[in-house]
Amino acid sequence: MRHLWIARHAFANEDESGLTGDGEQQATLLGERLAEVPVTALFHSPLPRAVQTAALVAKHLPDVPAEAADELDDRFPTPANSAAMIERFTGPAPAETHQLVITHAFQVAWFVREALEAPEDRWRGLSSCHTGLTLIRYFPGQKPRLIMFNDVSHLPPALQWTGFPPELRPF
């Protein structure tokens, strides 16, 4: 079984070259949240905001290798350009594994759309907060199971809704 933990990168500064102070706090809290999960590998987008998020999370995951993955880049998803991402990170694994992927809002939504077998245009309605955590489980011979989506319980209220469109925030 594969447990695929997916997180959007932390809050980035305006030019997206790194994280804000709030973003650094979000990434640290995400790492603390995942410290008890038996993560076996950490993959991240090669873009600076995801690289920095992964580095801060990795401090709480000793001995877990971190690797940049071009498939997780922040591009507008389509079946063609997302096929490699889905092929590499989804489906059952030969042995039970917990993998963490740190990527971007579009890619988080595409993973969820794929797991739910939703039509291609349905991913656009899914927004995720910075360091919002999603978990999808892949069992041999079964359909994927979406366990949670955009969980921000590891963040204090002031940091929970960054990156989420204001008109869609619950308060």
Image (cartoon, rainbow, N blue to C red):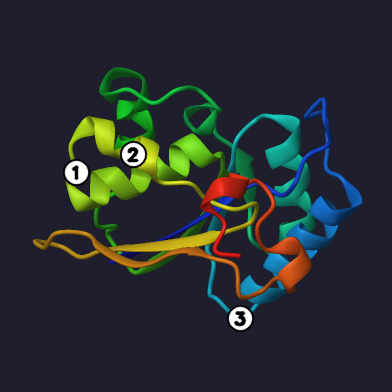
Q: Secondary structure at mark 2?
A: helix
Q: Position of residue 100 (x, y in %)?
A: 53, 56
Three-letter residue code for mark 1: Ala
Q: Is residue 127 above or below residue 146?
A: above
Three-letter residue code for mark 2: Trp
Quadrant position of the N terminus in the picture: bottom left
Q: Say whether disc 1 or disc 3 marks the residue closer to the N-terminus.
A: 3
Report the residue marked by disc 2.
123
Asked if the residues shown at circle 2 and circle 1 are in contact, with their CB atoms under 8 angstroms apart, the answer is: yes
Q: Identify the residue shown where x is 54% and y is 64%.
A: 170
In this picture, residue 15 sits left or right of residue 43: right
The residue nearer to you, when weighing 129 against 64, is 129
Residue 118: which numbered mark, if any?
1
Three-letter residue code for mark 3: Glu
Q: Identify the residue shown where x is 75% and y is 46%.
A: 11
Report the residue marked by disc 3.
36
Q: Position of residue 168 (x, y in %)?
A: 52, 51
In this picture, residue 99 sits left or right of residue 51: left
